[in-house]
Image (spheres, rainbow, N blue to C red):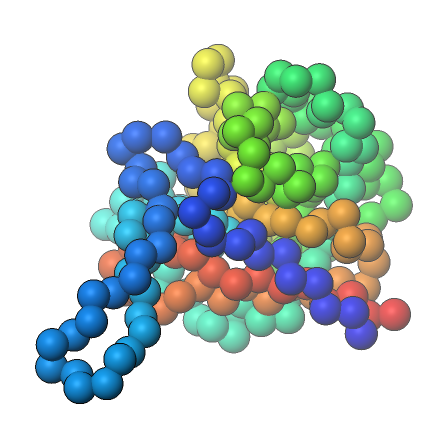
C-alpha cells in the first residue's frame, strides 16, 4: 500500500486568498511569567478556516441556518472513502494566464476512470507545485459551468482538486449554487497529486475539530492499493 500526503504545508510563504483574509504567519509565544523553566510554543497568527488545505460544507454558501456546519459531519464518513482521480494534462495550463477546464477535457481524461456515486472525486493538473508562488492564485485554472455540471452529475460525496480558485472571478461561470445544492463536500486545494495514480484509491480527510464553522483546515491523505 502506498500512502501519499496530499495536504499543502501551512507556512509563512504559502499562497493566501486576498483581503479581508488575514495573512498567515507563525510567531513564537512570549515566555509565560507563570512558568519557571523555558518553554516553546507558537502562535498561528492570521490562521482562518480556509488556510491551506481545507474541507468545506454547503454552509459556506448557504449559511449554517440553511445548511450544516463541519463539526456535524461524522468522522467515519471521512476515512477511507473510495476515491476516483481525473488527471488532466498539465501542459494545457502552462500559458501564464487563467485557463478554463472544460467538460471535454474532463471527459477525455476520465475515459478510463471508474467513477462511482458516493466517491471522493478528485481532479488535478499538477498545480500544487506552485503552492508558494505568486502564480498559484493569479494563474489558477478554473471550471466552466458545464464542467462543474458534469462533475456534480457523478454524485460524489467529496469533490476535490489541486487548484485553489474554481471560479472565474472576472467573468463568473456562476455554478456554485448548483454545486452546493447537490450537498457535496469541497476539499482543497491539494498537492502531490502528480504522485497519485487513478486506480484503487481511498481518501481520508480529517479537519481540525472546530465548532461553529462551515470549513476548517484538514490533513488529507490518499492510499493507493496495488
For the point 73% across and 23% down, the residue is 94
For residue 82, above or below residue 166? below
- Which quarter of the figure has residue 162? top right
Q: Where is residue 95 in the image (x, y as percent from the top left)?
A: 71, 17
The answer to whether one can see residue 139 in this image is yes
Q: In this view, does 167 lie to the left or right of 41?
A: right
Seen at 23% across and 50% down, the residue is: 65
- Marks counted in the figure total 0
Which is more toward the observer, 66 or 207?
207
x%, y% of residue 57? 41, 51
From the viewer's perspective, tell me whether residue 91 is left or right of residue 7: right
Query: In the depicted view, which residue is nearer to us: 35 or 64?
Result: 35
Residue extending farthest bottom = 36
The quarter of the rendered structure image containing the C terminus is bottom right
Residue 224: where, in percent of width, then height? 78, 66
Q: Can residue 117 be seen in this view?
A: no
Residue beneath the point at 44% across and 71% down: 74
Q: In this view, does 151 lie above or below 192?
A: above
Q: In which quarter of the image is residue 135?
A: top right
Residue at the left extreme, as displayed: 34
The quadrant of the image that shows the N terminus is bottom right
In the image shown, does 191 or 66 lie closer to the viewer? 191
x and y percent of residue 106 in the render?
75, 33
Amino acid at each position: 500500500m502506498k500512502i501519499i500526503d496530499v495536504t499543502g504545508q501551512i507556512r509563512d510563504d504559502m499562497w493566501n486568498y486576498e483581503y479581508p483574509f488575514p495573512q498567515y504567519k507563525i510567531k513564537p509565544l512570549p515566555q509565560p511569567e507563570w512558568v519557571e523553566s523555558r518553554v516553546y510554543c507558537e502562535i498561528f497568527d492570521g490562521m482562518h478556516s480556509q488556510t491551506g488545505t481545507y474541507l468545506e460544507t454547503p454552509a459556506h454558501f448557504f449559511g449554517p441556518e440553511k445548511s450544516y456546519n463541519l463539526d456535524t459531519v461524522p468522522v467515519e464518513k471521512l476515512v477511507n472513502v473510495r476515491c476516483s482521480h481525473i488527471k488532466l494534462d498539465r501542459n494545457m495550463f502552462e500559458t501564464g494566464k487563467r485557463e478554463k477546464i472544460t467538460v471535454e477535457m474532463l471527459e477525455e481524461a476520465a475515459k478510463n476512470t471508474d467513477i462511482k456515486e458516493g466517491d471522493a472525486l478528485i481532479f488535478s493538473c499538477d498545480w500544487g507545485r506552485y503552492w508558494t508562488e505568486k502564480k498559484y492564485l493569479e494563474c489558477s485554472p478554473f471550471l466552466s459551468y458545464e464542467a462543474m455540471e458534469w462533475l456534480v452529475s457523478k454524485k460524489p460525496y467529496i469533490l476535490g482538486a489541486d487548484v485553489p480558485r474554481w471560479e472565474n472571478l472576472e467573468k463568473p461561470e456562476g455554478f456554485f449554487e448548483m454545486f452546493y445544492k447537490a450537498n457535496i463536500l469541497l476539499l482543497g486545494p491539494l498537492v502531490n497529486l502528480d504522485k497519485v495514480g487513478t486506480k484503487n484509491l481511498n481518501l481520508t480527510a480529517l479537519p481540525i475539530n472546530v465548532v461553529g464553522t462551515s470549513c476548517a483546515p484538514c490533513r488529507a491523505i490518499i492510499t493507493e492499493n496495488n
